[in-house]
Amino acid sequence: MDYVIVIFFSYLFGSIPFGLILTKVFINKDIRKIGSGNIGATNVLRTGNKFLAAATLILDCSKGYIPVLVTSIIYPDQMQISALMTFLGHIFPVWLKFSGGKGVATYLGILFAFSIELSFLFIFTWLIVSLIFKYSSLSSMFGSLTVLMVNIIKSSVVKAIDPNFTIGSNINILLFIFFILIIFTHKKNIFNLKHKTEKKIKI
């Protein structure tokens, strides 16, 4: 029963389409008909409203952080299930015919619930790659890959010192799943990058 509660609570919380709600309420526009049609902060920014884009980013991060935090308090053994279902809720929301965002902000919120260090590693990597290449999609994919690889290396080194260590290694599979899902949600961006038609961001 606990698993059912965590699964539904996390999925439904993650499926809240904040980008769509904010643009509908404040500027009376359907974000799905603007730019890439994505409901995330990057596409909200294309409306020209930086405040709504920032609000979408913060809220999408919070919907990754809050369910996992609540689960860690009530059902600590099910944090990973909560994290995965929250992420799936964002990219496959039942309210929008399972067509949601790309999951990057929600992924970051989930990282904050698990590890401050990994969260800042992702932010740092995202900023560096963005400054060099000017592509948000590339920064997101490279950032999630960096988090995965660094955590694998870190947990392997620590486990070599202490064979009983399992905390860091326990989330490696979860981080790998997130990386694959982020690649999946960016498949169109990968196509655009390959054909040099991907839009650059202005930093």
Image (cartoon, rainbow, N blue to C red):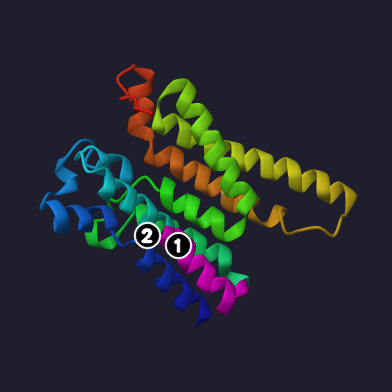
Please indicate whether residue 145 sits to the left or right of residue 153 in the image. Answer: left
Please indicate whether residue 34 sits to the left or right of residue 197 in the image. Answer: left
Q: In this view, does 30 lie above or below 139?
A: below
Query: Is residue 89 or residue 63 the one in the foreground?
Result: 63
Please indicate whether residue 115 sits to the left or right of residue 38 in the image. Answer: right
Give the CA distance from mark 2 to mark 1: 6 Å
| Residue position marked by numbered label 2 in the rendering | 89
Q: In x, y percent, where is residue 23? A: 18, 52
Q: Is residue 145 above or below residue 108?
A: above
Query: Is residue 195 or residue 34 the one in the foreground?
Result: 34
Q: In x, y percent, where is residue 80? A: 57, 62
**Label disc, if present, on residue 85 of the rendered structure:** 1
Q: In this view, does 109 lie above or below 8?
A: above
Q: Which residue is drawn at 55% across and 56% down?
A: 112
Amino acid bearing label 2: Gly
Magenta-highlighted residues: 62-76
The local crowd at label 1, few if under 14, some if 14 to 19, many if 20 or more residues have their Cα within 10 Å, is many
For the image, the number of numbered tags is: 2
**Label disc, if present, on residue 157 of the rendered structure:** none
| Residue 152 lies in quadrant | top right
Amino acid bearing label 1: Met
